[in-house]
Amino acid sequence: MAFQTDQLPGGARRPGAREMTALLALLMALNAFAIDAMIPALPQIGADLGVAEENRTQLVVIAYFLGFGSTQLIWGPLADRFGRKPVLAAGVILYAFFALLCGVAASFELLIAGRVAMGASAAVTRVLVVSMIRDLFEGESMARIMSLVFMTFMIVPVLAPLVGQAVLLLFPWRGIFVVLALYAAAMLAWAWIRLPETLHPEYRRSLNLRAMGGAMLETLKERQSLGYTLALTVSFAGLIAYISQIQQIVFEVFDSPALIGLVFGCVAAPMALASYANSRIVERFGLRRVGHISSVLLIIVTGAHLSIALLGWESLWVFVVMQGLTMGCFSFTSSNFGTLAMEHMAPIAGTASSVQGVIGTIGSAIIGFAIGQAYDGTVFPFLYGIFGCAMAGFLIVAMTEPKRLFASLPVDSSADPTPMMPDDLC
């Protein structure tokens, strides 16, 4: 149950529910734009910066993810000590600066370094958006709001490649980074004016290394936190493998470069729809039942897609349909697994979110990069890779909570006094 109050820590009044959801989602979307808007530009970047081996252009995507995972252990403790709002502002400012640095990079190596730094700065949004949602919600309500945020966030991949293509019609690929910097500046202004501080005073933590280490260790020792973090890591690796290879698959396997934006949008749209659907059903059926069933469906869909390809029936639009179903299943899975990983972490939400983010981002980037580097001009390495990721994700869940698979009972949250926003958010 939520307390019926508009007051947040420090006596500030919160924005309306729709504005808060949109603000948090569009902050997270800084990452989606930074990744997906680059996809149409990868061939131009490779040609302009003298990249001879085409698979190396995948590093433009992978480097961002590696940077994204590298600093979350910094942003989380800082946010638990100084509050969410000032730390968020610092990260967004750095994001804009490094976007401009990428825009003027004269070598592929400098571009990759800039992308790492850009991702490292943007990690603040992942840590703090999850932390702020955890500051305000718990259990199925948390999953519902997380789904609404992710629904808005996942609309961006539908638009980002189209934005990238539109920029390329008027400017060289460097213009995309200017657009990203302007977007970051706009989000900084909106967040600074309208976003309240959500960290509750009793949860402020010192930067004492022993205290920080204890919070990190607690996150790793808690079985549910670690288990669902690892399950989400291997599942997310499939998404990274898709993002890093989709340009090559559409351009080379299906010989349809002009359709890259349409293909990406058609595949991404089911993710937004699934996030919205999850927000409507998770409180009725429960986190575990919805998350576990969607994990099984992810195995079935990826296995079916692999079988279709092995039978020789693969085509561009078969790929789009099957990958769209895969992304829909992934969206259900990721929303609920992420919530379950954070469920018991309220007193250390910032640190826990950062620890889970480091494991999830770096782990999935390494696995996704390995799948991407296996690309051989066919879809088979990719399809085998995402099927294996789906299988591994469910296996980890089964090992984490073998007695609670598909459980529908709500989680007992009576021990968590965290104030929350009203339940009438949608």
Image (cartoon, rainbow, N blue to C red):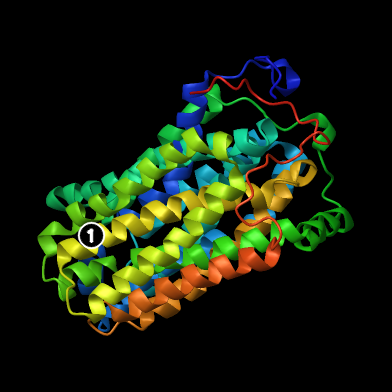
Viewer-side residue, 288 vs 73? 288
- Image coordinates for residue 14, horizontal then vertical, percent: 60, 19
Q: How many marks?
A: 1
Which residue is drawn at the image coordinates 18% and 59% (left, top)? 260
Which residue is drawn at the image coordinates 58% and 64% (left, top)? 231
Instruction: Report which residue position mark 1 lands on.
Output: 320
Placement of the N terminus among the 4 image quadrants: top right
- Image coordinates for residue 118, horizontal then vertical, percent: 47, 56
Is residue 114 something one can see in this rendering? no
The picture quadrant where one finds residue 418 is top right
Is residue 271 something one can see in this rendering? yes
Which residue is drawn at the image coordinates 50% and 59% (left, top)? 295
Viewer-side residue, 245 vs 328? 328
Circle 1 crowding by C-alpha within 10 Å: few under 14, some 14–19, many from 20? some
Which residue is drawn at the image coordinates 66% and 52% (left, top)? 341
Q: Is residue 400 above or below residue 282?
A: below
The amino acid type, in three-letter code, at marker 1 is Val
**Callout 1: SS:** helix
Viewer-side residue, 225 vs 120? 225
The picture quadrant where one finds residue 259 is bottom left
Q: Is residue 338 above or below residue 213?
A: above
- Image coordinates for residue 315, horizontal then vertical, percent: 15, 69
- Image coordinates for residue 28, horizontal then vertical, percent: 48, 43
The picture quadrant where one finds residue 349 is top right
